[in-house]
Amino acid sequence: MNNKELLLDIKNLSISFFTPSGEVKAVNDVSYHMYDGEVLGIVGESGSGKSVSSYSIMGLISDPGKIVNGSIMFNNHQIDKMTEKELQKIRGKEVSIIFQDPMSSLNPVFTIGHQISEVLKLHTKLSNEEIKKRSIELLELVGMNEPVKRYSQYPHEFSGGMRQRAMIAMALACEPKMLIADEATTALDVTIQAQILELMVELKDKIGMSIIMITHDLGVVASMCEKLAVMYAGRIVEFGTVEDIFYNTKHQYTLGLLKSIPKINADEHERLIPIEGTPVDLLYPPEGCPFAPRCEKTMKICLTQMPGYTYLSDEHYSACWLLDKEKFEGEKGE
Amino acid sequence: MFQYIIKRLGYTLLTIVIISTITFFLMNLVPGGPFLSEKSPSPAVLEAMNEKYGLDKPLGVQYKNYMLKLAQGDLGISIKKKGRSVNDIIAEKFPVSAKVGGVAVGIAIFLGIPMGAVAALNRGKFLDNGLMFISTLGIAVPGFVVATSLMIIFGVKLRLLPTFGLSSPLHYILPALTLAFYPMSYMARLMRSSMLDVLGQDYIRTARAKGVSEFTMLFKHALRNAILPIITYLGPLLAYVLTGSFVVEKIFTIPGLGGEFISSITNRDYPLIMGTTIFLAAFLVLMNVLVDIMYKLVDPRIKLK
Amino acid sequence: MEENRLNTNPLSFHLKAEDFLPADASEKKELVVMRESVSYWKDGFTRLLKKKLAMTALAFIVFVLFFAFVFPSFYPYRYEQQIRGSEDLRPFEYSQEEQAKIDGGESVAPHYLGTDSLGRDMMIRIMMGTRISLLVGLIASFIILIIGSVYGAISGYFGGRTDMIMMRIVDIIYTVPDILVIILLMVTLKEPLKILFEKNEFLSKLGVIGPGLIAIFITFSLLYWVGMARIIRGQVMMIKEQEFVTAARALGASSSRIITKHLLPNCIGTIIVTTTLQIPSAIFTESFLSFLGLGVSAPMPSLGSLAADAISGITSYTYRLIAPAVVISIIILAFNLLGDGLRDVFDPKLKK
């Protein structure tokens, strides 16, 4: 059914941070895969493990974090088994990342040009002149006017949006197979956000890469992504195509997220419904479904047992006992 | 930038004038003039001496005269060292202090910064704890204790190094080490926390994400940023080395300006006390300005302002 | 694709109908494990108790306080007492006279650290020296604390022109090389103070402390408050933007009330930390001055002057130097470590 090549395959990934107060299970038994050229959105609240799980694709989990279980296959590399040296060859070349805060993600003491060139110097055999030429091309590519002048400027001379463009130029310098955008537009003004998103989509088609969009903004995801993973408390609670998630929602948490986005054409009296309560403390993960304390439809079983996944189609699955209840009642009814 | 430098230098001048004024009035308001402590000179002699040094004139006139001379760089004549001008004494003694101090500053910078960086990179490990133990000792142990300990160990017990005067390069080791110990320790601690701070920054994560090697990340991306705050310490460092020289020159019998300053106080050589104070203060204040300007030059974030 | 699927739920025959009954609110509530919420101070102190280094330092400080303020009352010798014939004794050594007394059945207190060249017991001199050093550190820091926090709070609270002028003054004092001015002030203040004490009935009582010490307090409080003032100003400027201050103002609280009741109490963490770190630096400076012979006046000992006295006999009486040196290093180290610990706990932002 799908002839595209498998680019990323994460299986049963668990990542913990070993802090002085105990083990924080940031990512719990997460599995998903991506094909070449796909755009996957990962949605969740802060602390849901969405960033940590994607940093692990680059081997960027550092002390006191540790992959405790699972495997990550990316572009035929077994990331979880690779040494730091081997990982360095992949980072920035085959997979790149754009971080949330463009203000602090660029090194203040080097020029923008220098920071872009550095990636090319590391991963290509181009001469210094070619590198400079290419860097300027990249700045132009991400929509900067006067790229030659920009090349020798420092980050503090750039606005937020400009810095994020510079980050994108840096990330795309080696035409990676995959780009991870970690809340890449969250810190920007709304109009700039749209520009940056547009730029990413445009460049994706030009270079032919895959993108993982990490965000808590469902609006961003809807416009850009093909597939969505909804994460809660270190787990994927629902996975599916954008249509599945938006129009055939199966998990109560996803439903809660959808209810809390404002709609332009809403009835005058329709109110936004927030999700009550606070996320679980991952130092003390519950035995049952982590969403149970906040869920409107909690059942006895939710309190004691972790739900497994129910498949609604090959690409749409969700972990919720309600789905099992339906199935159970269906069987009993027969 | 140019404007900034002019402004800073203006303030510096103001500070020096204020210090000179304070110094002048403090010295002259002290009851019992400089000649009182001498073995009861006859009133006639006293008067003659007062006249000679202009001490019989009203204070305002004395102040005016002093400041006018000061503006021409003339610090007056020593009372106790007959016939020698304060300028002369400073010109003779200051280079000696500057040499020892320079070596100390060198030691402090070239040992302190690597110590801090290494400690930060080995955070929580044995090396870190060891280095931090040394530097904690360094900031807790007063200079005179360091000086005398070094003297006892290397000079008296082991007889490895000379402890008296400055006649050979070997003679510099103990005094310079003493002077360097505190600032070296302070810098190591400063560098450690600065380095740790930088290592937690987002741009270090960006560098890692680019595929930069551990070595490049540390020595190029982190060090450049971590060292910036250290530059601001260079001013206080000089001040410390300078005041430290008061003790060190006394203990190691070095004929420098620090020792001279202290003996001028015990001798109540007022013009010399005033002259040295003003000279040293002006030197420190100027150095501070230079360090500040240097900092602005090094940090690109401030460059265009 | 089937084999690619993730772990699914157990087959339905393992499940029972009761499992799917709705859970009630109390059951849901029980699931929420919350970390115990504790107050700022309680949390701080429990964390401080866990800091072994800081607690060890505190224990040392308590011991040194006893050593300096309590032990001397029980000690058989006085610090200025010169015992004839007992000059330059080594630790636990007795003079001929004392030996004779012991032989005659009398008990003579040993000189734990020997005596100095004037026949004064070294141990009690070190205790008194410690007392002086601690007094200087504590009192000077207290004065600095008062001046600095009030000045800083006023400057930060009023802002604008007031702030600009007040901070200019601070800047100028800040650039003045402190040690030079302190030395200058020490030299010049000693004489007038001596005269003042001799003339004034009331002040003559203060004269017991000695003009040297008073001069130290005056000079320290004239110069060293600027650091504290800067820190407090920064804090106040931050806090005054917060809503509770606006609320207090809206309710008609006067400026002085806002400063004393709302702003300063919120800076207390910073104030404690800065003061704790101020103490060792004051002790440091005092010992430095006394070492140079510019501090306390004889016969009163200070750790610095004791060390200076010991220099002349350094080859034969090394321990005379080591004893005060060790005590002063311990004091400074202990206060620094305690200050570091307090800062980690109460004021992590201040960490630089």
Image (cartoon, coloured by chain):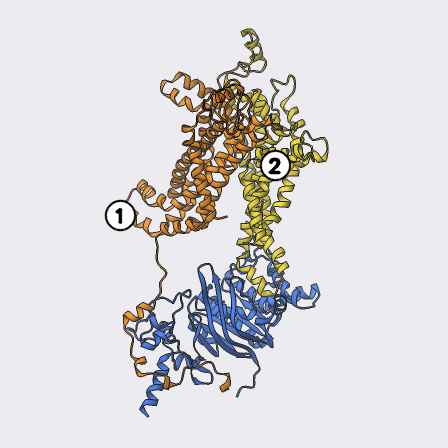
B40 or B21, which lies in front? B40
Please name the amino acid that badge 1 sits on.
Leu
Q: Secondary structure at mark 1?
A: loop
Residue depth check, mark 1 versus mark 2: number of the one nearer the observer:
2
Q: Is residue B75 above or below residue A68?
A: above
Whether residue A240 sits left or right of residue A4 in the image: it is: left
Amino acid, disc 2: Leu
Above or below, A263 against C327 in this view is: below
**Chain C, colour shown:** orange
Q: Residue at x 31, y 68 (%)?
A: C29
Colour for chain B in the figure? yellow
- The residue where tag 2 is placed is B179
Quick one: which residue is furthest to the bottom in this view?
A334
Q: Is residue B76 left or right of residue C161?
A: right
Residue at the spot of label 1:
C251
Q: Is residue B233 above or below residue A294?
A: above
Q: Colour of chain A?
A: blue
Q: Chain of mark 2?
A: B
For disc 2, the neighbor class at 10 Å (few under 14, some 14 to 19, many from 20) is many
Q: Observer-nearest residue: C136 or B137?
A: B137
